[in-house]
Amino acid sequence: MIQFYKGVFKSIDLIKFEQYDISCFHSDKYFIVDLKSDYNIEFIKFNTIKDIEVKIFFSSDSIKWVDCYDITNKNLYEFYINTNTQNKYRFIKINIDYCLIKNQLIDIYVRKYPGLMIAARSDGFGARLMPILNAMYLAEYTGFKFGFVWKKVAHDATSLKQFEDNDLAGIYLSNEKYIFSQEFIDEYSY
């Protein structure tokens, strides 16, 4: 689990970016991180060695820059940036001296998938299963990640019946764990 990440993707859907170049400019007033290719940047985290105001910008070409507004300052020195953007970027510009980054360490997480295809019906079993199959197909077709939401409804508990020492389920099912394996739930349940 990535601490302070607020996006819709799970931690397993993100890749921690390890290889990037740093360039410092204009008397150390800012530096640029070059990811060497365009990515869906989802989350950035770093610590500073002193209390400063931080602004972050993104770019695909290092000419036109887009401001990032979702910067969370957990305390005076910790910064968490949830981008949750549909755009891909190659460059990250941070308006502080690179020497002020604690241990010169910036954690950058990018998406494995360009988006999510979520099935989210909450009524009967059949009505839930068809959107799951559709979402699986569309996710494979588009390159998105498949996921589902299995909301428990009030009818679930009253749907189970006893007949000759057997539990019979009606059209409603109480929990995803009775239908899918735990591995499937861990990977795809949102």
Image (cartoon, rainbow, N blue to C red):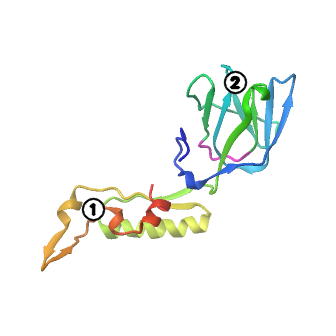
Q: Residue at x 87, y 24 (%)?
A: 26
In whole angstroms, how far apart are the C-alphas of marks 2 and 1?
A: 50 Å
Taking depth in this image into account, of 159 and 162 the one nearest to the observer is 162
Q: Estimate the x, y position of residue 171 in percent, counting from the top left.
A: 25, 69
Q: Estimate the x, y position of residue 61 in percent, counting from the top left.
A: 81, 42
Q: Estimate the x, y position of residue 116 in percent, counting from the top left.
A: 54, 56
Residue at image mark 2: 49
Q: Counting other residues with Cα less than 10 Å from the Cα at mark 2, is it few (<14), some (14-19), or many (20 or more)?
A: few
Q: Residue at x 12, y 80 (%)?
A: 164
Q: Kindly tell me whether residue 147 is visible in this rendering.
A: no
Residue at image mark 1: 174
For this orientation, the residue located farthest to the bottom is 164
Q: Residue at x 39, y 68 (%)?
A: 180
Q: Could you tell me which secondary element the residue under label 2 belongs to?
A: loop
Q: Is residue 86 magenta?
A: yes
Q: Estimate the x, y position of residue 55 in percent, counting from the top left.
A: 69, 27
Q: Main structural element of the magenta stretch: helix, strand or loop?
A: loop
Task: Identify the amino acid type marked 1.
Answer: Ser
* Vertical arrangement, residue 162 with respect to residue 98, above or below: below
Q: Which residues are magenta?
A: 84-89
